[in-house]
Amino acid sequence: MDFEQLKDRLDALLEKESLGEMRGALMMLNVVDIAAYMDTLEGENLLKMYRILPKDISADVFSYLSEDQQQRLMRLIGETETSRLVGDMYVDDAVDFLEELPANLIRRLLRNVDEEQRKNINAFLEYPENSAGSIMTAEFCEFHEGITAKDALKELKKNAPDKETIYTLYVLDPQRHLIGTLPLRRLLIAPDEAPIEKIMTTGFVSARTLDDREYVAELVRKYDLLSVPIVDNEGRMVGIVTADDILDVIRQEATEDIEKMNALLPSESEYIKTRPVKLAMNRLPWLLFMMVSSILTETIIDKFSASLTIAFSACIPMLMGTGGNSGSQSSTLAIRGLALNEISPKDALKVLLKEARVSIIVGAALSVLCFGIQTLVFGRTVLEAGAISAAMLCTVILAKTIGSMLPLLAKKLKLDPALMAAPLITTLVDVCSLLILVLFASSVA
């Protein structure tokens, strides 16, 4: 059943106020689908739907609601009941919800939360945004050295219901230093009396609380992990980052990079819910920068207009367009390579040599084609066509050099390589391509 059919069925039950049947229908659904349906409701219907939910899943459903819907439901149910929800949520979900609220409201909500949960939430709220600590959860299965596989299984059955994931288990020493990891499968098939130290894996990977969340995502991708243990500066384990959180990180980072690469300031709000003024302010700074930058192009054309005959002036759009596209191709591949850790700033020479070979091949092919078009289609003289074609070759080589090197430079300077994408590179290449054209035009004048 697709979402529209599901929505129609639940709408009908809600309209008839068949609450018992509605509750039964909800119990057959995933909490994500329940949250998706609740996101379509307003006012009394939203509250009625929430009241129908069994208490053991209400916190999970609440964590999947959109931010706006969470705020609406919080106003409907009041702070006391919202505090109960926060107390029942996994720490990372609770932090995601609370960090969007005013500080005084957070304090009021946390007053009624269990002391240990409140302590964990406050600690997590202090981690810098986009750090591993800000997205980790404290609900993981831990064991201490000195127990057997049989005892570990007993402990697991006791504690597992309150943990976010149990696929990977963690072995700690008395000081809570991580000394090994244990896949659930290995624990299940191990002999009952096997010491846990004998069946755990000591060759684990971990991240620190202040590491960038993109680094954690890279660990998950590289080592095919379901979760990554997070330790503090003294090596004590404080939480884990799970694969579902990493998927959110990848989506957010990809969206941010796409926005930066297209001359937009990053925005965390949904497009349809963002005010026009906010959208305009996200776009205006880059547009202003590029408009001011294009004045350089205008200045060059104005200053050297005497050297640019009709033939050379007519080919300016073609030259600038080809140069901009060539630079964008190289920058896209460089940004992708940096994002996947396929290249780094120390590979600048290798990248430069490779792009040089590529640009010579591409530039030569384009310049030959350009020469044919200029002479056969536009009737330019051999001298004019040769100068334009030579400018084309030089522009492509320069554009690909700039396009591949700027992202590496940004990475070296600890900036986001996505900043050095199409709009910025195109503006820079436009200026360079005009200077090259002027140089060749002057040589045949």
Image (cartoon, helix red, strand yellow):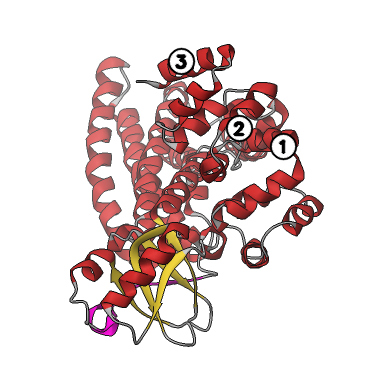
- Residue 204: name its quadrant: bottom left
Q: Give the amino acid at mark 2.
A: Tyr
Q: Residue pushed farthest front?
A: 20
Displayed quadrant of residue 271: top right
- Pointer 2: residues within 10 angstroms few (<14), some, or many (20+)? some
Q: Which mark is residue 77?
A: 1
Q: Position of residue 134 (x, y in %)?
A: 57, 60
Quadrant of the image occupied by residue 387: top left
- Ranked by sequence position, the earlier of labels 3 and 1 is 3
Which residue: 75% across, 36% down?
75
Does the CB distance between marks 1 and 2 fall below 8 Å? yes
**Distance CA(mark 3)–CA(mark 1):** 25 Å
Q: Give the left or right position of residue 66, taking residue 179 as reference.
A: right
Q: Which residue is mark 3?
A: 9
Disc 2, SS: helix
Q: Quadrant of the N terminus?
A: top left
Tell which of 128 and 39 is nearer to you. Answer: 39
Per the rendered image, the range of residues in magenta is: 195-208
Residue that label 2 marks: 50
Give how far apart the Cα atoms at labels 1 and 2 are: 9 Å
5 w.r.t. 34: above or below: above
Q: Which amino acid type is marked by label 3?
A: Arg
Mark yes or no: residue 286 visible. Answer: yes
Is residue 312 something that shows in the picture?
A: no
- First in residue order: circle 3 vs circle 2: 3
Can you give x and y, in whole percent of width and height, for residue 157 in the image? 36, 64
